[in-house]
Image: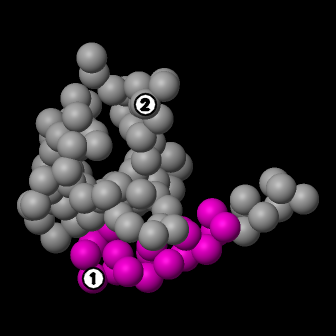
Amino acid sequence: MSFEIELVREAKEDLKRLRKTDQVKLLDRIEKHLTHEPTRQSRSRIKRLGGVVFPPFRLRVDEFRVYYDVDEAEQKVVIYGVIRKADAEDWLARSTSRRRKHEDRSTE
């Protein structure tokens, strides 16, 4: 069974900022690796990030990192960011922080 791929607005904007050749390569790898087994980890491509990091999965494509979550019940992969490796640590810190603030507000 294949998974539906959804890109949030920010991820679409990330892609638009890249060169066309990088866009094509990234979309091809997203399709190849995330439509059938998005949670299957490998040493070189897919990694489940530890701790309280959000989003919990990372796909490595050359100098880029694709950060995503998987909804098994809905058979959907939601991509939250397409980031250059050099910017990935800062992006993850901001993303995790935003997620915590959102969860804190929703439990009040």
Q: Is residue 6 visible?
A: no
Dot 1, how many residues are within 10 Å of its Cα: few (below 14), some (14-19), or many (20+)? few
Dot 2, how many residues are within 10 Å of its Cα: few (below 14), some (14-19), or many (20+)? few
**The C terminus, quarter of image:** bottom right
Q: Nearer the viewer, mark 2 or mark 1?
A: 2
Identity of the residue furthest to the top in this view: 1
Q: Which amino acid lies under the numbered mark 2 shown in the image of this protein?
A: Glu
Question: Is 70 displayed left or right of 42 in the figure?
Answer: right
Q: Is residue 46 visible?
A: yes
Check disc 1 and report its element: helix, strand or loop: helix
Q: Position of residue 68 (x, y in %)?
A: 39, 51
Say the numbered circle drawn on residue 72: 2
Q: Which amino acid lies under the numbered mark 1 shown in the image of this protein?
A: Ala
The residue under label 1 is 86
* 3 vs 33: above or below: above
Magenta residue span: 82-100
Whether tag 2 and tag 1 are in contact, CB under 8 A, the answer is no
For the residue pair 87 and 3, the one nearer the viewer reads as 3
